[in-house]
Amino acid sequence: MRFDLSEEQELFRDTTRRFLLSETPLTGIRDKWESVHGFDRQWWSRAAALGWTSLLVSEDSGGGCLSGLPASDAAIVAEEIGRTVGPGPFLPVSLTAFAIDGYGTAAQKADLLPSLLTGESVATWAFAEAGDVWDASALSTRIETDGDSVVINGRKSYVEAVGSADWLLVTARSGMGLSNVVVPADARGVDITPGRSVDMVRRFGTVGFADVRLPRDAVVGPIDGAAEAMDRMLALAVILQCAQINGAAGELFAQTIEYAKGRYAFGRPIAAYQAIKHRIADLLQRLEFARAIADAAALAFDKGQADARELATIAKAYVPDVGLDVVDDCVQISGGIGVTWEHDAHVFSRRVALDRALYGAPEFHKEALVDGLGLVSCR
């Protein structure tokens, strides 16, 4: 838990928490396992009305945050979503709204942002490719210019909420650089294959592009000039992921402590035994470290610090493994009931495991840190 929140941020966090607990309680998450989209569009509009979709968009574009620190404010929502393993396309909508506001033309902002901010429309970012490719240098999808048009060919994987999206922001190679293009989900040549994931409520899929022709003004920012936008979007993605992981692991940890206080063995609560107490203390220490680095990464991003990208990479290299370790230890402390369908542990574990893999697993980010420091890689 962060202790430096302003009064407005505290109110926003409490409002977000009450909304999630009342509208999508943890007890009902399993019921969404069989649903196609994992969330209800009307529910998403109500979530947007709370300001979720506006935090990373400037006031000039109809958005606004609470503290002047948009990523830090968005991390509050992400952490609360993690606490309830909540549904909804918060991450992909936040990323696409951020990109359009920061790099789009006035016409693109006017056309795309209003419905995105109200929750009327849903968008997602198509970046990664099959084979766990999260490195821009390894992308194979291409965007070619042809007069007043651009043509896209390739295939994207691990695209969140693609079955619910009205449009996609596609990042692909173009010429000697990268370009971002807004692609309507129903554009000719777009082939969407919705899929599932280990998570109860988050849906993913693949998208094929076969000679998808769009006007040149569908390009967000300059042709071949999307490297900065992509880099900032990746940093923002892992910051929000880490906040969500901390929320999920922290909530299960709190539930496990309460269980240990009420579970008796040999006439004493198991929380009174030294082995359990030491284990809980170690988990709390690691969890607080994870929260600290995630908060530091969000603040560095907001302030435009030179080390912002590095801190985001450090966070993704550290936080997900802590989250999984916390979840696994909580399962062990809970005993046999912790591995049942009825217990919440597997619901949290699914969320943390998924976020660990998306936008590059910790191993990928550790390698990036090694390369950035000029050290010898251990591959």
Image (spheres, grey):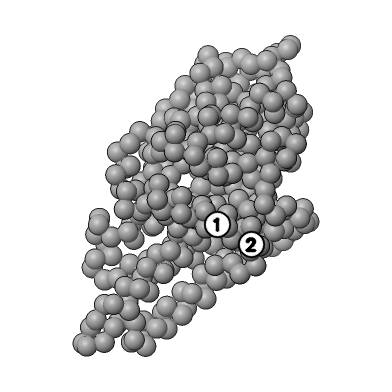
For disc 1, the neighbor class at 10 Å (few under 14, some 14 to 19, many from 20) is some
Please tell me whether residue 66 is drawn above or below residue 204 in the rendered image: below
Residue 22 visible (yes or no): yes
Q: Quadrant of the C terminus?
A: bottom right
Q: Secondary structure at mark 2?
A: helix
Please tell me whether residue 324 is drawn above or below residue 46 in the rendered image: below
Furthest toward the left, the residue is: 266
Q: Quadrant of the N terminus?
A: bottom right
Please report the residue visible at 33 percent of the width from the left and 42 percent of the height from the top. Answer: 32
Please tell me whether residue 363 is drawn above or below residue 169 in the rendered image: below
Residue 368 visible (yes or no): no
**Mark 2 or mark 1, whichever is nearer to me:** 2
For disc 2, the neighbor class at 10 Å (few under 14, some 14 to 19, many from 20) is few
Residue type beneath disc 2: Glu
Spatial CA span between label 2 and label 1 = 10 Å
Please report the residue visible at 24 percent of the width from the left and 81 percent of the height from the top. Answer: 264
Residue type beneath disc 1: Arg
Seen from the viewer's position, the closer of residues 372 and 331 is 331
Q: Quadrant of residue 140?
A: top right
Residue 295 in percent (x, y) is at 63, 62
Q: Secondary structure at mark 1?
A: helix
Please report the residue visible at 64 percent of the width from the left and 45 percent of the height from the top. Answer: 55
Residue 307 in percent (x, y) is at 74, 58
Please tell me whether residue 240 is drawn above or below residue 214 in the rendered image: below
- Residue beneath label 2, please? 7
Please report the residue visible at 51 percent of the width from the left and 47 percent of the height from the top. Answer: 358
Residue 360 in percent (x, y) is at 55, 49
Using the image, tell me which numbered label, if any, was put on residue 58. Answer: none
- Residue beneath label 1, please? 13
